[in-house]
Amino acid sequence: MVWQQVYDPMGSMFLSTLFASLPVIVMLVGLGFLHMKAHIAAGLGLLSAILVAVIIFGMPIEMAGKSALLGGLTGLLPIGWIVLNIIYLYQLTEQNGSFKILQDSIAGITEDRRLQLLLIAFAFGAFFEGAAGFGTPVAVTAAILIGLGFSPLAASGLSLIANTAPVAYGALGTPIITMAKVHGYDLMALSGMVGRQLPFFSFLVPFWLIWAFAGRKGMMQIWPAILVTGLSFAISQFFVSNYIGPELVDIIAALVSMISLVLFLKVWSPKEIWRSTSLKNHEETTTSETNPLKPQSHSRGDVIRAWLPWVTLTVFVFIWGLPDVKAYFNGIFAPKFPIDGLHNLVEKVAPAVSTPTKEAAIYVFGLLSATGTGILLAALISGLLMKYNPLTLIISYFKTIWTVRFSLLTIVLMLGLGTVTRYSGLDTTLGLAFATTGVLYPFFGTLMGWLGVALTGSDTASNVLFGGMQKVAADQLGLSPNLMGAANSSGGVMGKMIDAQSIVVASTATRWYGHEGDILRYVFFHSIALASLVGVFVTLQAYVYPFTALVIK
């Protein structure tokens, strides 16, 4: 029997919206203010989502339970699979000492912690976002930063802040391609429109990142390097997105940015080397900051061997991100499991969609094509190159599973919560509340995208969730559908730093377990402030010349 979603079960949009937001409030309050462990806060959020869906929104309890199951399975594969295997690789490199050599080689490029952040958290992270997405860049960069001696809060929070500008074009343009395909946007027009919004923030984010780490004075001391990093990325992002397409935007922009920064550092260096590894005004100075260790020098062969696991990782992640490769592996083995009792039995209705639309609920066990599988193979090959014997590799893997067990549980519960809100229509109720803002819709429509990513952990999922609604609302208000579709994705990237799965990935990568609430409290201001700035910019594009000249109709 088909169940139709109800978006105003209380007969009052205010009350319905209040109930729809309750699961998110429960989770965020538990995590950020009551200092609960992440898996407990996530579990309470999931429980409240099921109760609200069933009692208030009238969803059959069996459907609510099965949507939670679908979300949990998605949490394990592909998200948890990425986290597990990237931590496995990191631990292998740490145990044999090669990570220390890598650390010294990076310090050889620059000992300045601010410049290391630009190179690793922003540029290197953007490359991994472009190649794989889905938590990979935060896992990699946070692990490297913690290995370089950054404090856990700095490594976690700054990796999350840096992983914003590239998200809309992550995983070879998946969020843009999916929105265009699902909701009927012109792909190049949508890609170009996002490429006329995000470059302004790709230029801003490196400045914001260093300001968040070192304060205004510390930022101004290295403004030429930040300018080179941000400008080279933003210009590349604009041209590739507008004239080539969404697939290689991040990869090309990241490579150009990294190369530009490294070359610039050969002719320029800051007057003062910043060796602090803690967040200014947030943490006390550590012993390693007052007595900084000079990087050791290593032979070229040792440095090459230290970088080899990460080069191998980069190659495998890039290969696994190629659509043709994914299609090939899916053709070999990717069984699909329709969730009986949920698949095509939930129907979205107006005003969320113009015609009633059944929601598919199929779990694809794409183990071969999953990015985490490529990471695992890279880790195993790297382990053999590092002279580990097979038995040691197996033992280390099971130790890694034990290490990240609570993180995997948290991701399962978080994805379960997000999936329940989707199938029950709670997220649509929240979106419709934004859609009632009239002339202010360009601003609040942008925040709708931010909310979508904060809830689902994915710009792709947010675009699927709200892309159609953005198009309908734009037509009703006389705005460009491409503008608001792009705003959903551009605003969404700023929600990436506060989505629960990203925070868990960061805490796991830095092995700062139980501190997810600290990370959330730190990044929340940055997330809402940057999202609001995107909203202001989109509003200017909607109504104010010369910004309106940037709009693709």
Image: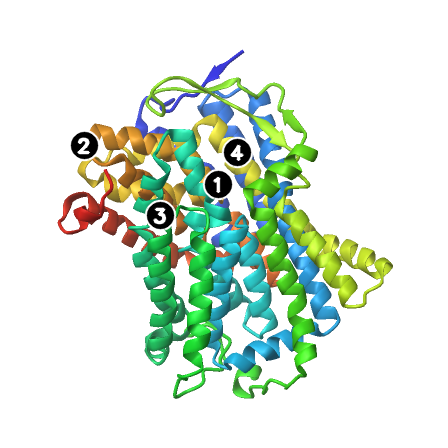
Task: Tell me how the rendering is colored.
Answer: rainbow
Residue 429 is left or right of residue 520, and the answer is: left
Mark 3 or 4, closer to the camera = 3
Mark 1 to mark 4 CA distance (whole Å): 8 Å
Instruction: Give the residue type that dot 1 points to.
Output: Thr
| Location of mark 2 (residue) | 478
Residue depicted at 62% across the width and 47% down the height: 371
Q: Which mark is residue 456?
A: 1
Q: Position of residue 38 (x, y in %)?
A: 58, 50
The image quarter in which residue 427 lies: top left
In percent of width and height, residue 382 lies at 72, 62
* Residue 306 picture quarter: bottom right
- The answer to whether residue 240 is above or below residue 280 is above
Q: Nearer the viewer, mark 2 or mark 4?
A: 2
Residue type at numbered disc 4: Thr
Q: Where's residue 323, x and y in %? A: 55, 41
In the foreground, 496 or 485 = 485
Label 3 close to label 4 by CB (< 8 Å): no
Task: Please name the amino acid that badge 3 sits on.
Answer: Ser
Q: Which residue is mark 4?
A: 419
Q: Residue at x 37, y 34 (%)?
A: 467
Q: Is residue 149 above or below residue 493?
A: below
**10 Å crowding of disc 3: few (<14), some (14-19), many (20+):** many
Tag 2: residue type? Gly
- N-terminal of the pair, mark 3 or mark 4, is 4
